Amino acid sequence: MDKLLFLLVLFPMTVFAGGESLEALDLTTHWSGYTALVLFVVAYIFVMVEEFTCFRKSKPVILVAGLIWGLIGWVYAQNGLPHAAEIALRHNLLEYVELFLFLLVAMTYIEALRERQVFEALKVWLVNKGFTLRQLFWTTGFLAFFISPIADNLTTALIMGAVVLAVGGSNMRFISIAFVNIVVAANAGGAFSPFGDITTLMVWQKGIVEFSQFFSLFVPSLINFVIPAAIMHFFIKDETVTSHEGEVAVKQGGLLIALLFILTIATAVSFHNFLHLPPAMGMMLGLSYLMIAAFFIHRQERIFNNDSFDVFRKVAGAEWDTLLFFFGVIMSVGGLGFMGYLALTSEAMYASLGATYANILVGLLSAVVDNIPVMFAVLTMNPDMSTGQWLLVTLTAGVGGSLLSVGSAAGVALMGQSKGLYTFSSHLKWTPVIALGYAASIATHLWINESLLDVPI
């Protein structure tokens, strides 16, 4: 009976492995390829104008992902290759599932910490410290830089943005400059950690760069943040603004959950580095830590409060629009890659320009197009690059989004939070200064990590 079950499980895999080879058709000059390109561009236009239309970004990309793979499946079936598209799609689904599970656990922890008022307590503590505007500028910047490697840059930016709004009041000039600084700092901080940004997470999960090697980007990332901040510093008046908010106590279990989050990250790293298992499995084990802790927190709070802590509400509170957006992007870009477009792009960029200039261009593209599809495209193209070049593209994709306010989730979120005090045009005024930091960070990486530029992956 056990042997029969084993054969039943193995049967679909053996059919695909032994029955039909993964023959790929070049659809780059086929009508289906042109249609897929147009659909993807239209979908991404909807993504870029989400702020104005309020049409959630996940909706158009999921629709287009389905249409693109529908076109691929139809063309392959017409050419007598009915299972080739299925095998390719399953490969993309596996990549998404690993990313999805990892992010779902991280977002659940962040949501739990937010509900336990850990972030609110930090915000109130900063507001009540009585910093001058310049001190607050640097404090929020450095906190954004050092928190985003652990939390995501979106959450970090929103917390620091709330502090600036609470202290800055109606000082539009200060709020605008401080928000630019927070965006740059949060994006720069996320670039040197596997957990700081989706792009670094994808590179790490792919096994291209080891966990410890990401920290080679610490100094370049710090340069990327400090140079623009040092220039903007002189445009802020050194005055004290009195502001006070009532004390906020961290709810029961808040600090424990923070410690469990750190333990979860350590578990994911250990699974990947020592057990050679996907980091997502370690994160799911870490989710069980939170679920068990939530059981005891719930029992304690139920005595005094009917609306006690429920971990499944935290799962429901995850950023599902973002998670589903990743699905649509990965499936769409994967479909375009299977059609042959990413091979053409790789030839045009990496073969013609060379790895260094191509990777710098990737960062500039991420200021206009979200860095997630850009990085997934690079990973799918899989150009032959050294470890140092993979670190370079990780750096540029992470910090390139700071050049424009719409180039990162942090910038888009702060535009909404500021209610007109921080805008696309107010950020654009500082783009030359941010570009100076971008160039300096690249030069710093090429200098201090020169030895890695010749190290094969």
Image: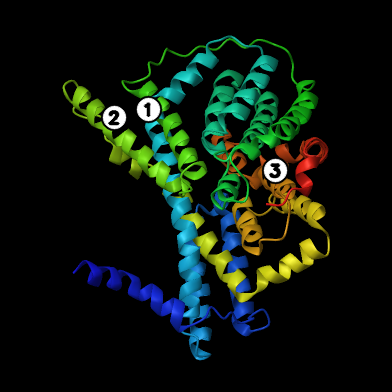
**Does dot 3 land on a helix, a strand or a loop?**
helix
Q: Which of 287 and 419 is in front in this view?
A: 287
Structural crowding at the residue carrying mark 1, measured as other residues with C-alpha within 10 Å and reported as few (<14), some (14–19) or many (≥20): many
x 59%, y 53%: residue: 372
Can residue 427 be spotted in the picture? yes
Residue wearing tag 2: 293
Q: Nearer the viewer, residue 205 or 147?
A: 205
In the picture, the disc for residue 104 is: none
Depth check, front residue: 392 or 133: 392
Residue at (66%, 31%) from the top-left corner?
A: 185
The 10 Å Cα crowd at callout 3, few under 14, some 14 to 19, many 20 or more, is many
- Residue at image location 53% in from the left, 54% down from the top: 53
Give the label on residue 257, or none: 1
1 or 2: tag closer to the N-terminus:
1
Q: Is residue 386 above or below residue 196?
A: below
Q: Mark 3 points at which residue?
A: 395
Q: Residue 156: give x, y in percent of width and height.
A: 54, 32
Please name the amino acid that badge 1 sits on. Answer: Ile
N-terminal of the pair, mark 2 or mark 3, is: 2
Task: Check if mark 1's residue and mark 2's residue have beta carbons within 8 Å.
Answer: yes
Q: Which of marks 3 and 1 is nearer the N terminus?
A: 1
* Mark 2 surroundings within 10 Å by alpha-carbon count, few (fewer than 14), some (14 through 19), many (20 or more): some
- Alpha carbon distance from label 1 to label 2: 8 Å
Disc 3 from disc 1: Cα separation: 30 Å
Q: What residue type is labelled 3?
A: Leu
Q: Hey, which quadrant is residue 451 in on the image?
A: top right
Q: How far apart are marks 2 and 3 (CA)?
A: 36 Å
As helix, strand or loop, the secondary structure at mark 2 comes to helix
